[in-house]
Structure formats: structure tokens, C-alpha cells
Image (cartoon, helix red, strand yellow):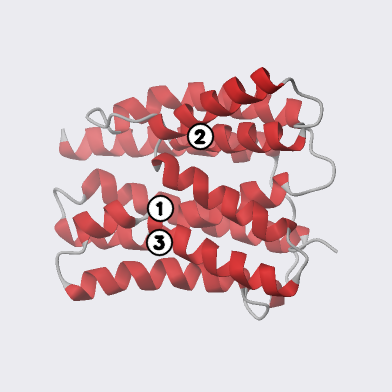
Amino acid sequence: MPYLTSSQTECLKWLALITMIIDHIGVAFSNAYPALSWCRVIGRFSYVAFGFIIALNLSRDKVNFKSYFTWMIATAFLSEISFTLFEPNYDRLNVLFQFLSVIGVIWVYKNRQDLNSWVMFFGLGFFIILSALSDYGLPGLLYCIGCYLFLQTKDTQFRLITMLTCVLLALFVNHSFIDNFGETIVETISVVTVVVGTMIFILHPKGLRQCNISISRMPKLFFYLFYPVHLTIIIGIKYIFLS
């Protein structure tokens, strides 16, 4: 039995997409409207959720890595145009390159018996460097791998350890945001609450897994293009109202 049903996974996808929009509204407009900086706190849900979804997809017995690589590479390069316009002073690649690095590391791991040791070494090296150059950096990669190990673990005691590790890694992913945003104890607690609350919602047996809902699977093209399209729309709105 899968960790999440198809409908539960779709629910998590929609929540991640919505909170991503909220987060990016905060990025685009919080300088002009400081109250919108709280959108960035709500947005902490997004990467934690997307990272878990990537790990969930990769933990399946049969993964079409060719299709996964193709879609992610194409969308990552396409999105870099919008991402550069969205944050022209940011020195990292967009988050889809981070997810591409996760897929690459897991691909190397799953095919370790069939790969030459040099191919494994250079493959892992390439994807680790790609992760370091992408949004969320190496903590983002470690979090997704932590979620993958959690989903692969069957032993109850070890699963509890990996569950706690996932929570700690989720906080680690957001450590720079906490440092920059958490100017007061209330702000710091707010960020930690959102991150830990998200992990409890995903991991606790009475959280998302208890949701008895029916949601159709969103079209693959819609899901992959959502990222660059929503960035382009926000850029347009910002240009019209704040140029």
C-alpha cells in the first residue's frame, strides 16, 4: 500500500502550489508592502511539501527516470528565464534544478549495481554540485534524500529515526530564511511552527493520510508549466503596478 493515495498526493500538490504562489507574492511585493512579508512565512510549506512529493514519486518500485529527467530538464531551463527576471540579483538556479539533482542522485543510487564506479563518482559529483548551485542548496538535497530514506524504511524503530531526521532537515532547509526573517522571537517561532506543522501534517498517521478525499490527478503539462507561468504572471503584475 502506498504511503499516500493518489488523491492525498494531489491534495499535497495543490497545497504546495498555492503556498508557492503566496511565497512568491511575498518575494515580489514585500519591499513595497512590508505586511506581505508574512506571505513568505506561509510559503515555507511549499518546498517541504514538494520535496516530499519528489521523494514519494522516486520511492515507487517502477520509476520512469527517462520521462522524469526529460520533463524536469526541459521545464528547469524554460523556467530559468522567468526566474532570472523574477529575482535578477539572486545567484542560484531555480528550484527545478534542485529537484533535477534529487532525481539524479536517486537514479545513481538505484542503478548502483549496474554502473561503473567512475560513472557513479562523476554522476554523484555532478548532481551534488548542481544542487549546491540551485535554490535551497545542499540542505534542499539532503531533505529530499531524507524523505526518500523515510519512505524506503520498513523497520518501525528506524522509521521513527528517519521521521525525526526529516523534520530536522526541513528546519535546516529553512535555516537561512530563519536567520534573515526571524528578527524577533515571534517571527522565528512562526517560521518554525509552519515548517514543523507541515512535517506533522505530512508524516503523522492522523494528518494528511487521514484525509478521505477524491481529487483527480492534474495534467502533467499543467503541473510542470505552472512554475514558469505563475512567475511570469507575477512579474507582469509587478511591472504594471510597481514599475
Would residue 11 be visible to someone looking at this image?
yes
Q: Nearer the viewer, residue 158 or 80?
A: 158
Dot 1, how many residues are within 10 Å of its Cα: few (below 14), some (14-19), or many (20+)? many
168 versus 123 height, above or below: below
Q: Earlier in the sequence, mark 2 or mark 3?
A: 2
CB-based contact (under 8 Å), mark 3 and mark 1? yes
Q: Which residue is mark 3?
A: 171
Q: Is residue 33 left or right of residue 43?
A: left
Residue 122 percent coordinates (x, y): 58, 20
| Quarter-of-image position of residue 193 | bottom left
Look at discs 2 and 3 and give the one toward the viewer: 3
Dot 3, how many residues are within 10 Å of its Cα: few (below 14), some (14-19), or many (20+)? many
Looking at the rendered structure, the kind of residue marked 3 is Leu
Looking at the rendered structure, the kind of residue marked 2 is Leu
Residue 66 percent coordinates (x, y): 75, 25
Q: Which residue is mark 1?
A: 173
| Residue 37 disc label | none
Looking at the rendered structure, the kind of residue marked 1 is Val
Q: Which residue is mark 2?
A: 96
Dot 2, how many residues are within 10 Å of its Cα: few (below 14), some (14-19), or many (20+)? many
Of all residues, the one furthest to the bottom in this rendering is: 206
Look at discs 1 and 2 and give the one toward the viewer: 1
